[in-house]
Amino acid sequence: MNRITVHFGCQVSKEKIYVLWKADDVTVNFGSGMRRLLFLLSHHGLEYKLELFYENIWQIELHRSCNQTSKYLLIQLFGAPRIYKKEVRNSRFVFGDPLLHSLMYVPDDQWVRTTDFTQSYCIGQSSVICLELPHNLQLPNFQSFAYYKETDGRLVLESVSSYSCNLTLVPSVCPMQEVNLPFEILFKVSLLVQNGCIPGPTLDDNFYRMVDPSRIDKVYIDHALDKLYYLKECCYEPSRWLFEEYRAYSRSKKHPVSPAISLDYGLVYVRRVQITPSRIFFCGPEINVSNRVLRQFRNDIDNFLRITFVDEELEKIHSINVQARGRRTGIYQRILSTLRNGIVIGDKKFEFLGFSSSQLRENSAWMFASRRGLTAAGIRSWMGNFSKIRNVAKYAARLGQSFSSSTETLTVSKDEINHIPDIEVVKAGIKYVFSDGIGKISAEFAKRVAAKCHLNGHTPSAFQIRIGGFKGVVAVDSTSSWKLSLRKSMEKYESENTKLDVLSWSKYQPCFLNRQLITLLSTLGVPDRAFEIKQREVVDQLNALLTDPLKAQEALELMSPGENTNILKEMLLCGYKPNEEPFLSMMLQTFRASKLLELRTKTRIFIKNGRSMMGCLDETRTLDYGQVFVQFSGSRPEQRFLVQDKVVVAKNPCLHPGDVRVLRAVNVPELYHMVDCVVFPQKGSRPHPNECSGSDLDGDIYFVCWDPDLIPSEQIEPMDYSPAPSTTLDHEVTIEEVEEYFTNYIVNDSLGIISNAHIAHADRESGKAMSRPCLELAKLHSIAVDFPKTGVPAEIPRELRVKYFPDFMEKPDKPSYQSHRVIGKLFREVKSLAPNECSINSLTRENMERFYDPDMEVDGFEDYVADAFFHKSNYDYKLGNLMDYYGIKTEAEILSGSIMKMSRSFTKRRDAEAIGMAVKSLRNEARSWFNEMQSGSDDETDDAYAKASAWYHVTYHPSYWGQYNKGMKRDHFLSFAWCVYDKLIQTKREKAAIRRASDLSSLELQFESGLHLR
């Protein structure tokens, strides 16, 4: 469509658009496969292209009115389009060197990403794009678009000026000066505007007064604003809506409860801001695991802010968008200027603070709003003394140690720490440190630390820790009298902090193959058939768990240990059938569907004879080079099994065939206290951990497998993982240099590209992972992994970039072919079994009548039904809010952690832990409601079972179907009752025992009457 007028703005009613900016003579194209819209336009003599993906379209609405000369195609947006600027070729060279310019062909139609070019950033402020079209213009067929509709109503377009109070980070709103809103309410109001819940231009003085806690009860405000977010449609008259909501609250007999979940110890609420090239999105508060900094400054939690730089579709922004053909784009400047200038929200100015290593990989960082007596610089000074570190990358990494999510345990003074030497060897001029990152902890102190981690009497063999400027692992040493014994390789900077923070510990962790491991093992001679058999065994087990209680128990124990697994196991043990009880059934169906999806998308195959294990050091000097000690626990921590055989050891990610080591697990009685960790020798010419992808012992988790079918027949010399030389400064590192390093990391972030290229080349090349392209990519990957420590980027040559992808990589927008290697075969075997979403039918009233279990009724339960209904209403509301916030479709997904699909703002890898913690906190909060009336007497124990029965009744009885979350388009949830599963299971068992006793008595009576069974 040519010569179209396009209006950018906000819809403020069903019939009216406020226009912030318009463009004439626009060409509109529909991209291939109807997956995007392209807008080509000119502005101030420059040509621009806007690319709007369908993922960013909420709804398309065609307005036709016989009284208007034009018709209007209204596109309502989730986010902004991507903006490109056409490069202009003129007399000035694109490249500084004229010879280089003559050799480099730059096409005339080359488009480069940029930021919002309009005055006042109007594209970023807009929530709708409105196409003004001639009445007779033939439109493409939008009927296939899920959210398309047509209306004959009149549409009014009215030009207005910008409504955002900040014209660099739009849209954000604030009230007139006489209304002074608290930061948390102002944040929430801007969040509602940015997410299309309320139209920004309509927020007037009256609205801001109605969210002012000096005028309205703050609990009312919090509850109402929370409800606005979850309405799933735009509220065009927010002031009137608030008035009606407040009136309903005041008339209600019960005061509305806080919509926030009460958090378990060690968790905090943190606000987050997502920054795209054109706009911003406020998020949260979200539940986060605490870290050293947040704990120290817990009273300033509202002054901390997490920021993440993302693309317009809220996915990770790629390096090609930040730098094109050697030149930095406008997006680079936007990222750097945001870090340098900070973010202003109300009366708070948030400034750059730092980032952890995992945050850096997600293009995320912490900011802090300084106050009198505390600044971002002051917090960094409190962390430690970094002045001796003269490399920017290393300086940033050391700052990041304090931001690692952790559990605070006990104080250890300096005179309770023993400093012990590292174990080193020099080979061919290269120094190897066998003890790199590992120390020791006394058995008695380890027991106290485990108690602080709430490990229920179980003491792990090793802990990953932070204390002061030290980081790494401490393994239990029963002979040591020192609380901690730490090595020089663990010390990264000077710090006075004496709190021992625990990040993780050795425990049962299932073991899975993935595409990298399969590629390397296949290269080393493991036959295709071995992998095919392993996958079929997993599929058979997943299919059986829906019908066979014993197979279901086994699968849950092996593949997914945890609290939810215990609930399901108890339900199976007390007689519930996997395909009959609805809660049990939906949890098992979701577990199965998620594991099948992992098989299809990641070739993630569960290996029974293997474990994922934390690496540790043989402090006894018993093990020889080529040997390891492997002892693992069963489904209960007290069960222990010793491996004495060949084992495959590797550490993900692994790209070089030499990363896979075949070692021998041996019996060493002196190491029997080491469980669920792989113990490496301190003898030899090179540490085995270093041979495995250049790893160490500071907390790395290793793939350890003793399945004889997966032991490769060949071994390859490991790669040299000596890091590239890094730059040393002649001055102390400045925070401005750290900010620039963060931005440059995004430019040079090539890990994903290299890993994907390696998989694709290994699939096509005859030498698989031993081919020249794969070996080059393995070396580049090592450089890219070290970039956060060295600052040296990995530059990928053009010939290593992939042009054709194997079918199992599922890239529909790229040329592909059918793979004949083992991963391709495995993919096609499960492709039809593994949909993207788990299709669980919503419960109906009729279902509930069939599923209600009368065994769960206990005398006196009726006395607790009213309270149970009240608590279930609150529980369901909070659980539904969590599901909607993270974009999780089903109750079973969020409860089990087997999440199939999430909102664009989140990823399973980054957010699964926080979601799991949020659900656990909600369940604990529900249990606290249950325990409010109990003091432990016998009568109250009986009452507890009646109360649990009432919780079951208001969850399962058909008369309560549809009574919760009214008007919110949510399913009927079942998990509330199972928050007190121990009481319900006991009730079920007692009823079954009574029934068995009754049946036995009946049989005895029949025999006594002379009747005989046939």
Image: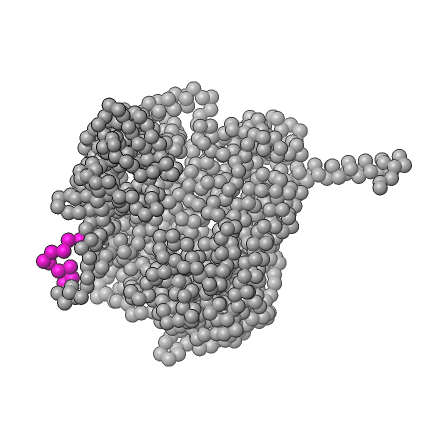
Residue farthest toward the top in the current orientation of the protein: 251
- Start-end of magenta stretch: 87-96
> Which residue is more in the foreground, 36 or 121?
36
Q: Is residue 469 left or right of residue 566?
A: left
Q: Answer whether residue 79 is visible to the viewer in this image.
A: yes
- Look at the magenta stretch and give its main secondary structure: loop
Q: Quadrant of residue 731?
A: bottom left
Q: How many marks?
A: 0
Residue farthest toward the right in the current orientation of the protein: 1010
Give the percent coordinates (x, y) of residue 785.
Answer: 36, 63
Residue 598 vs 787, above or below: the answer is above
> Which residue is more in the foreground, 163 or 101?
101
> Which residue is more in the foreground, 525 or 953?
525
Q: Answer whether residue 671 is visible to the viewer in this image.
A: no
Give the percent coordinates (x, y) of residue 555.
Answer: 59, 52
Q: Residue at x 42, y 64 (%)?
A: 763
Q: Residue at x 23, y 65 (%)?
A: 729
**Where's the N terminus, which quadrant?**
top left
* Magenta highlight on residue 418: no
> Which residue is more in the foreground, 651 or 177?
651
Give the percent coordinates (x, y) of residue 288.
Answer: 41, 46
Q: Residue at x 32, y 35 (%)?
A: 60
Residue 367 vs 498, above or below: the answer is above
Looking at the image, what colour scheme do you see? one colour
Give the percent coordinates (x, y) of residue 370.
Answer: 27, 45
